[in-house]
C-alpha cells in the first residue's frame, strides 16, 4: 500500500515480506526458464539420436545387399509389399528420412514417416525380442516428441520459415 513520505509528501511503496511458498515459486520459475533454454538442444539431440539409429540400420542393409534381400524374403514379412520392393523402400526410408530428420528439413513429415516405418519394422519381424520391441517403443516415443513439439530452433525448417518471402 502506498504511504506518504513524511519529508516530501510523495507516495512510497512498502516492501512486503514474501511467504516461503513465493520463494519456492520463484525458484521453480527460474528452473523452468533454464529448462526452456535447453529445449532446442534437447530437440536436436532427440532428432540426432533417432536419425543415427535408423541411418546405421540402412547402412548395414546397403553394405550387403544380397543379405538384405534374403532377410526381406525369409525373415521380414512386410505387409502389402513384395519382398524385393519392401527391401528397396525400407532401405531407402532408413537412408533418406534420418538425414531429413537430423537436418530438420520437413521434420514433421520425416517424423511421421519414420514413426510409421518403425511400426511396420516392429510388426514385420516375428522373431523380435522383448528388448528389441522396447527399443522400437523408445524410438517411437522419441519420434512422437519431435512430431508433437516440432524440430526446435536448431533446424533448417526454422531457418526456411524465417526467410523473407517464405
Image: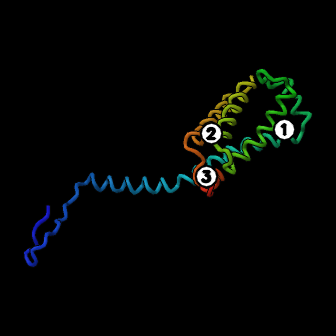
Mark 1 burial class by Cα count in 10 Å: few <14, some 14-19, many 20+:
many
The picture places residue 123, in percent across and down from the top left corner, at 71, 24
Q: Which residue is mark 3?
A: 161
- Residue 100 placement, left or right of 6: right
Compared to 164, does 106 lie above or below? above
For image coordinates 64% across by 53% down, the residue present is 160
Callout 3 secondary element: helix
Mark 3 burial class by Cα count in 10 Å: few <14, some 14-19, many 20+:
few
The picture places residue 137, in percent across and down from the top left corner, at 63, 33
Nearer the camera: disc 3 or disc 2: 3
Colour scheme shown: rainbow
Whole-number angstrom distance, CA of label 3 to CA of label 2: 22 Å
For image coordinates 73% across by 30% down, the residue present is 121
For image coordinates 10% across by 77% down, the residue present is 8
Q: Residue 143: which disc?
A: 2
Whole-number angstrom distance, CA of label 2 to CA of label 1: 22 Å
Name of the residue lying farthest toward the front: 165
The quadrant the N terminus occupies is bottom left
Q: Residue 61: which disc?
A: 1
Name of the residue lying farthest toward the left: 6
Whole-number angstrom distance, CA of label 1 to CA of label 3: 35 Å
Q: Camera-side residue: 132 or 156?
A: 156
Callout 1 secondary element: helix
Nearer the camera: disc 2 or disc 1: 2
Amino acid at each position: 500500500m502506498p504511504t506518504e513520505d513524511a519529508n516530501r509528501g510523495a507516495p512510497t511503496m512498502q516492501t512486503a515480506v514474501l511467504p516461503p511458498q513465493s520463494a519456492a515459486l520463484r525458484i521453480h520459475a527460474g528452473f523452468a526458464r533454464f529448462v526452456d533454454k535447453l529445449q532446442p538442444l534437447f530437440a536436436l539431440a532427440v532428432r540426432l539420436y533417432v536419425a543415427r539409429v535408423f541411418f546405421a540400420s540402412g547402412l548395414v542393409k546397403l553394405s550387403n545387399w544380397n543379405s538384405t534381400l534374403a532377410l526381406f524374403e525369409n525373415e521380414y514379412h512386410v505387409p502389402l509389399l513384395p519382398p524385393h520392393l519392401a527391401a528397396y523402400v525400407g532401405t531407402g526410408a532408413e537412408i533418406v528420412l534420418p538425414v531429413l530428420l537430423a537436418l530438420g528439413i520437413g521434420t514433421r513429415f520425416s517424423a511421421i514417416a519414420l514413426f510409421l516405418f518403425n511400426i511396420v519394422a516392429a510388426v514385420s519381424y516375428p522373431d523380435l525380442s522383448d528388448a528389441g520391441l522396447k527399443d522400437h517403443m523408445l524410438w517411437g516415443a522419441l519420434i512422437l516428441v519431435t512430431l508433437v513439439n516440432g524440430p526446435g530452433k536448431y533446424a533448417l525448417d526454422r531457418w526456411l520459415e524465417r526467410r523473407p518471402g517464405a
